[in-house]
Image (cartoon, coloured by chain):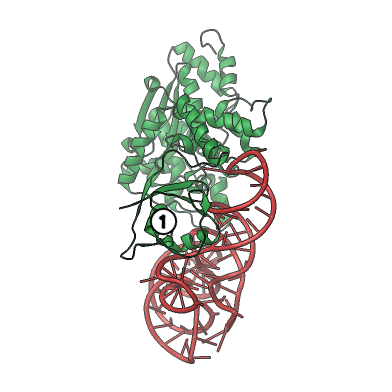
RNA sequence: GGGCGGAUGUCCGAGUGGUUAAAGGAGACGGGCUGUAAACCCGUUGGCUCUGCCUACGCAGGUUCGAAUCCUGCUCCGCCCA
């Protein structure tokens, strides 16, 4: 849409079209009017805690919304929560988060910033680390702590549930929403974005800004993208995520693993349109997979990933390239299969035995009998060892 | 400060002296089927030099022929009273 020709009301409606909440009512329109009047861009805040090394698809939903603001000429303030990561966001949590080391957080912060650029426009971007201001004097921390009451914090769902369930809640965690709100004070956020799970934190930010005599931010929450299991929120800790830096074949394959029921949601949140009506779920999913690979790699990679997938899962042929696995025939020239599987695929030798028994191990495409467990190295050399459907290695004797 | 309760395998969660490597569920993995790594069905799921051996029910001891189950001390956590 064009910035010049549309009214603030229309722009606000467009920006909020796929948001869950945009509060307070009419707030975004007023901010846009204010910006137009003063001839300044709005400051759109997003805070991310570098608790995991990679950005995943769920996060790109919010980044995409930020990009829309950028394309309208506004400034995105990306806050790398190097300090808040040490606290741990309790949102959606049923237990206290594990604490990360400082080095780990710093390393994650680096990659986060780089990966966010896959979606954001670097020209209208300000990146800050909240360690800049959260490493504050105790006196200042006390002032911040005075802005809110325990009841206010405990009314929030995550805490309420944990409290009711007699689960531990540390004082530090109670601080988290305050620190996030203080970020908004410092960067003078006009708008703060987040997932729906951030609603409480974002709203509390308004109160804290108010306490510090700053204009209150508008909050805009985006739907949460379900993970590849189609059920729970996409998250590193659930292991149901697709990272934006994952190889093309992984992005492609994991997307196809998505349950059909979640396909509509993924289309809506990642493509911004419903799935194509004229094709079935399989082809709609394949089209989505290609789109995602192309977005984070390129068109060529998308085609290659699809070809590799078809070769593997439809034609049941091994991939062109696969790693070599050293074949170490002991003194008697015999190779112990469980040990070979363990060294080649990183499974335990007990797992290897089980997989052999279940017919999950193939040699040149033919199921390998569970007995005998020791085979002469000469019989295996140069052949393709396969574990399950997707793991391959070519055996090479040293 | 006082009283009470809890800690089990990747996770959740049964189990209160003896076929208990430990029910059940989730997850994961393998096989079948298929339209995909969907769905559905079946199976597996502590480790190892594997017809056996080792390790395991918060930690350290103890009782017993035998303990995740009983006793003692300790650690951590929750609740109540103050």
Q: Residue at x 44, y 38 (%)?
A: A320
Q: Residue at x 50, y 21 (%)?
A: A68
Q: From the viewer's perspective, is residue B80 above or below residue A269?
A: below
**Residue A314 on image: x %, y %:** 58, 39
- Res A397 seen here: yes
Q: Which quadrant of the rendered structure holds the N terminus of chain A?
A: top right
Q: Nearer the viewer, residue A33 or A333?
A: A333
Residue that extends furthest to the top in the rendered view of this protein: A5
- Res A190 seen here: no
Res. A220 image quadrant: top right
**Residue A83 on image: x %, y %:** 36, 42
Q: Nearer the viewer, residue B66 or A142?
A: B66
For chain A, what colour was chosen? green
Name the residue tied to disc 1.
A379
Query: Is residue A7 toward the left or the right of residue B63 in the image?
Result: right
For chain B, what colour was chosen? red
Name the subunit of mark 1.
A
**Residue B75 on image: x %, y %:** 39, 69
């Amino acid at each position: 849409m064009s910035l010049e020709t549309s009214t603030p009301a229309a722009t606000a409606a467009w920006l909020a079209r796929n948001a869950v909440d945009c509060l307070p009512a009419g707030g975004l329109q007023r901010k846009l009017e204010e910006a137009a009047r003063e001839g300044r861009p709005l400051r759109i805040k997003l805070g991310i805690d570098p608790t995991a090394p990679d950005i995943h698809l769920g996060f790109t939903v919010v980044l995409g919304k930020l990009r829309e603001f950028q394309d309208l000429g506004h400034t995105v303030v990306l806050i790398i929560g190097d300090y808040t990561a040490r606290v741990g966001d309790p949102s959606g949590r049923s237990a206290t988060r594990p604490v990360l080391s400082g080095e780990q957080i710093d390393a994650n912060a680096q990659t986060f910033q780089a990966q966010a650029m896959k979606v954001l426009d670097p020209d209208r971007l300000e990146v800050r680390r909240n360690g800049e201001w959260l490493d504050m004097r105790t006196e200042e921390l006390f002032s911040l702590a005075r802005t809110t009451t325990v009841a206010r914090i405990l009314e929030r769902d995550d805490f309420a549930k944990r409290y009711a369930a007699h689960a531990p809640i540390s004082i530090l965690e109670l601080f988290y929403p305050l620190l996030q709100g203080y970020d908004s004070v410092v960067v003078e956020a006009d708008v703060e974005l987040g997932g729906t799970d951030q609603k409480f934190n974002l709203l509390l930010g308004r109160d804290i800004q108010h306490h510090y005599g700053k204009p209150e931010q508008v909050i805009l929450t985006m739907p949460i993208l379900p993970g590849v299991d189609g059920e729970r929120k996409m998250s590193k800790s659930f292991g149901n995520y697709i990272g934006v830096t994952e190889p093309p074949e992984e992005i492609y394959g994991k997307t196809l693993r998505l349950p059909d029921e979640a396909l509509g949601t993924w289309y809506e949140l990642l493509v911004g349109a419903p799935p194509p009506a004229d094709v079935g779920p399989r082809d709609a999913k394949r089209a989505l997979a290609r789109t995602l690979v192309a977005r984070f790699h390129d068109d060529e990679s998308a085609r290659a990933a699809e070809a590799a997938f078809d070769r593997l899962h439809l034609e049941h042929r091994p991939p062109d390239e696969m790693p070599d696995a050293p074949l170490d025939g002991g003194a008697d020239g015999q190779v112990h299969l469980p040990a070979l599987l363990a060294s080649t695929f990183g499974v335990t030798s007990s797992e290897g035995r089980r997989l052999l028994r279940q017919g999950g191990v193939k040699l040149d495409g033919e199921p390998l009998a569970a007995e005998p467990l020791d085979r002469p190295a000469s019989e295996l050399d140069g052949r393709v060892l396969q574990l399950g459907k997707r793991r391959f290695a070519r055996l090479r004797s040293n």
